[in-house]
Image (cartoon, helix red, strand yellow):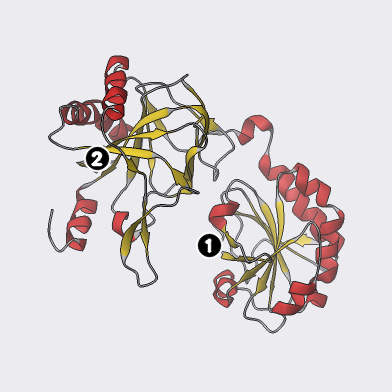
């Protein structure tokens, strides 16, 4: 058994694995966005028959407890369009999950069906090590050893995501007035930017993923100008210093409330839909703390750490980061939200609108 230093058909260690998605055996959707937060050993099978992967899958199955302790998954990637897809459907291994991927996935990996290949990825879908060899038991053990060495100690697992927390952006009394302003005005159900089958953008409501009430602060609102002033005076210079980024434009500003009983916004990226691709940094200001349970911000690609910044403090992070607002179990979480972008992104945004600002 050897760890392959420069494999011909798989990305080198340290690089990001090609984004992969497909269907689980129960026909539920699988993607690397859902995998984020959990490392994995991936067995690339492509269109190979089950007989070609049986010994390898069996070896991983035998040491499944080790992968459970490492909080890692073992995945078998099968070509859903290959001649043996249905044969894999009949196979049964309790601790190895089969994912049916399109043929393009294997082309992206550079996999050519000569023999199964094992690749270990970390919680952020970066390649830890591609592993080759003829001894199936040794390959499985090497994959487990790679995971054990890459996840580190509990302390190391809680290394922070690349976010900036700026305290005292808003005063406590101003936070309280914003909460009162929200409660005294009509709210809307929080939706998401999405795209239909024809590529047309639309506003989607899905409370299984996003359960929140929103109130948009309009430019004529008496609270709008003080918020803009605080972002400009306090946040923009700190963002420039931390990220070397000139935040010139502010997106819509809203006050949001995550209610008791599961108010949340599960895993997402804030610039994934074409209509919001101009967004570059998210800014989230907590308006209350200590009044609710749950309601953390999580960045599963980086660690299991849960963030809850102080009242009046802003959390600023790139919109490309996968993150979530975890469910509120008790009480209500109030937060002020907006997005920031620079002049170049503004030019792209207006161009997409046909030149209209």
**Image quarter hosting the N terminus:** bottom right
Vertical order, 19 against 159 (above or below): below
* Front residue of 249 and 199: 199
State the CA–CA distance, disc 1 to disc 2: 30 Å
Q: Position of residue 59 (x, y in %)?
A: 85, 61
Q: In terms of secondary structure, where does tag 2 sit?
A: loop
Name the residue located 68 percent from the left edge and 54 percent from the top edge: 40
Question: Where does residue 279 sit, x and y in percent of width and height?
Answer: 30, 49
**Image position, residue 138 (x, y; %):** 84, 59
Q: Can residue 289 be seen in this view?
A: yes
Residue 48 showing in the rendered view: no
The residue that mark 1 highlights is 19
Using the image, tell me which numbered label, if any, was put on residue 247.
Answer: 2
| Sequence order check, earlier mark of 1 and 2 | 1
**Crowding near the residue tagged with mark 1, few <14, some 14–19, many ≥20 C-alpha atoms within 10 Å:** few
Q: Quadrant of residue 250?
A: top left
- What residue is rendered at 24% in x and 42% in y? 252
Question: Residue 304, relative to residue 87: is it above or below?
Answer: above
Of residues 132 and 212, which is closer to you in this image?
212
Tell how many labels: 2
Image check: 115 left or right of 273? right
Seen from the viewer's position, the closer of residues 164 and 50 is 50
Residue at 56% x, 57% y is 32
Label 1 residue SS: loop
> In the shown orientation, is residue 70 left or right of residue 164?
right
């Amino acid at each position: 058994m050897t760890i392959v230093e420069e494999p011909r058909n798989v990305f080198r260690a340290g690089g990001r694995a090609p984004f992969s998605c497909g269907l689980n055996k129960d026909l539920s959707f699988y993607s690397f966005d859902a995998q984020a937060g959990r490392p994995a050993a991936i067995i690339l099978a492509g269109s190979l028959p089950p007989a070609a992967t049986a010994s390898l899958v069996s070896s991983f199955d035998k040491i499944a407890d080790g992968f459970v302790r490492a909080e890692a998954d073992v995945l078998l990637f099968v070509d859903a369009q290959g001649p043996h897809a249905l044969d894999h459907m009949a196979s049964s291994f309790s601790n190895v999950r089969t994912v049916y991927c399109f043929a393009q996935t294997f082309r992206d990996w550079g996999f050519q069906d000569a023999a199964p290949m094992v690749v270990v990825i970390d919680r952020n879908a970066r390649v830890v090590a591609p592993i080759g060899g003829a001894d199936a038991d040794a390959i499985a053990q090497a994959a487990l050893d790679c995971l054990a060495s890459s996840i580190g100690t509990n302390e190391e697992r809680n290394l922070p995501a690349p976010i900036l927390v700026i305290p005292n952006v808003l005063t406590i009394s101003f936070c309280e007035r914003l909460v009162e302003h929200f409660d005294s005005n009509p709210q809307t159900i929080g939706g998401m930017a999405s795209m239909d089958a024809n590529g047309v953008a639309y506003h989607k409501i899905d409370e299984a993923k996003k359960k929140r009430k929103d109130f948009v602060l309009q430019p004529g609102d008496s609270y709008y100008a003080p918020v803009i002033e605080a972002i400009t005076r306090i946040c923009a210079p700190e963002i420039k210093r931390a990220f070397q980024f000139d935040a010139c434009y502010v997106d819509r500003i809203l006050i949001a409330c995550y209610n008791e009983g599961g108010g949340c916004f599960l895993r997402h990226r804030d610039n994934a839909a074409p209509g919001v691709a101009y967004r570059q940094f998210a800014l989230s200001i907590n308006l209350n703390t200590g009044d609710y349970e749950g309601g953390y911000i999580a960045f599963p690609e980086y660690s299991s750490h849960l963030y809850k910044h102080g009242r009046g403090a802003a959390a600023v992070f790139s919109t490309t980061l996968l993150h979530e607002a975890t469910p509120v179990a008790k009480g209500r979480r109030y937060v002020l939200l907006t997005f920031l972008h620079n002049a170049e992104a503004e030019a792209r945004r207006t161009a997409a609108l046909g030149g209209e600002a």
